[in-house]
Image (cartoon, grey):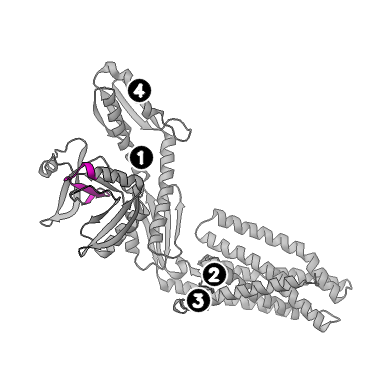
Amino acid sequence: MINIPRWQHILTAVICLLGVAFAVPNLFSEAALSRVPGWLPNRSIQLGLDLQGGSHLLLEVDVQAVVRERLESLLDEVRAALRAKRIGYQNLGVTPQGVTFTVRDAGEAASVREALRDILGSGAMGQGPDVVLKSEGDLSTLTLSEAAIALRKRAAVEQSLEIVRRRIDETGTREPTVQIQGDDRILVQLPGVDDPERIKRLLGKTAKLNFRLVDPTVPVVEALAGRVPPGSELLESDERGGGLPQHYVVRKRVYVSGDQLVDAQPSFQQAQVVVSFRFDSVGARRFGDTTKDNVNQLLAIVLDGRVISAPRIREPILGGSGIISGSFTVQSATDLALLLRAGALPAPLKIIEERSVGPSLGADSIAAGQVASLIGLILVVGFIVVYYGLFGVTSVVALLVNLVLLIGALTALGATLTLPGVAGIVLTMGMAVDANVLIFERMREEVRLGKTPLAAIDAGYRRAFATILDSNLTTLFAGIFLFQFGSGPVRGFAVTLSLGIVTSMFTAIMISRILIVWWLRRYRPQVLPI
């Protein structure tokens, strides 16, 4: 163990230099780092919410809205299927139990199942049919199976997580935390966010965009009186007339949906702020067909159940792109374009918990962490130097190198440092000398057995290595499992603990060994100062 190959010296030097290179940027401000060339390390450690301040939001996905939406679409399917088979029905509607209707002619009740065969035949990933039909006399009820409901709820939460992450990334927030918590909740932590209200507005909008035709057969006055024909609905508009919101009678059929958008950007047209959009190939074809077949009709652009605008189709729009005009400011147009690019949420989100962490509290936490680290460092250094003398000094050097390597590794990996992460660093500093303690105690035993200094040092490193490896691997596995299965603060602690174990093993075995071997060959002592 005392014959160290040249390549190990070179590798150790390279690793130490890289650690210093990545750790040094943490000593400078963001303004100074912005002037550093891109090919040099120019990033500092990202601070978490508890250290930097910011916003903490807990969102709840309204999974019941997904079920209601599926039942609404099921109602349309049932209506179409019964009409196709010419089966008379009445009282068709959605109830808490499902989609219900009664058959006018009791003799046709037996034909209902055959008419709805295609609807009842679909299944959820091999777990049986999605839709179950129950008939009692002339009353029929279609309900969603438990497997189908569970599948849709889980898919809604996972899709909501991805879209929330996209929306936050679009705002440029650095190192956000977005993860599922429980069955139907999403945790969002935004370090350094100085405008949480804007983030809440962006996350609170479902952003379901669709293009529908205005129904010209029904005056708005009659619709406001409750006379809305089947297949149409009355929607409020963002446009205002005489200070009051306008309304449109809009057909329920969706000709083109926002799912087919591939890009949306704020822009200007004739000194007016608008949002330009572009469809994919399928959406462009549908949009072109819709505008070609409905020239001179009003096309309602509906976002989350409100009509943004309803321009008249002057001519076919065949290029697959267009604009959305309205009473937009630059900020509102930018936010709308962001929402459209990120996609629509499958269900509404409700903020059930909100906390703000001020920068002053984060600064206090950092100061407390620095004090704890300094006290821990002083105590460890004092003990190891007093107890092991010169060899203890080599451990102190290895400990300082370990701290630099740990900070460099956190910076290079882009890890987020949290308050529990600071606790992991303090713990790592205390554990970093454990390997050296095992090695030095083994050297003492070898000296008591009458070994020469050279043989004692060689045996100390060689025989203690297996014990060091075993003890550190078990702790490393625990850190990996904490990171894999933990969340939030637990993961922050696991990151620094795991990285600290790796760096402390390297410094204890390589740095201190190189220093001791160098001292041994230079002075050739007759007695070990240990």
Q: Nearer the viewer, residue 177 or 238?
A: 238
C-alpha span from label 1 to label 2: 45 Å
Disc 2 residue crowd, few under 14, some 14–19, many 20+, Cα 10 Å: many
The residue lying toward the viewer, choosing from 276 and 490, is 276
Crowding near the residue tagged with mark 4, few <14, some 14–19, many ≥20 C-alpha atoms within 10 Å: some
- Residue bounds of the magenta highlight: 291-308
| Quadrant in the rendering for residue 218 | top left
Mark 3 vs 1: CB contact within 8 A? no
Write down the residue under mark 1. 67
Q: Is residue 260 left or right of residue 526?
A: left
Whether 300 is among the magenta residues is: yes
Q: Do labels 1 and 2 touch, CB within 8 Å?
A: no
User: Which residue position is annotated with label 2?
Assistant: 411
First along the sequence among labels 4 and 2: 4
Label 1 or label 2, whichever lies nearer to me, is 2
Q: Which residue is mark 3?
A: 37
- Expressed as whole percent of the image width and height from the top left, the position of residue 330 reads 26, 64
Three-letter code for the amino acid on which mark 3 is drawn: Pro
Kind of residue sitting beneath label 1:
Val
Q: Is residue 193 magenta?
A: no
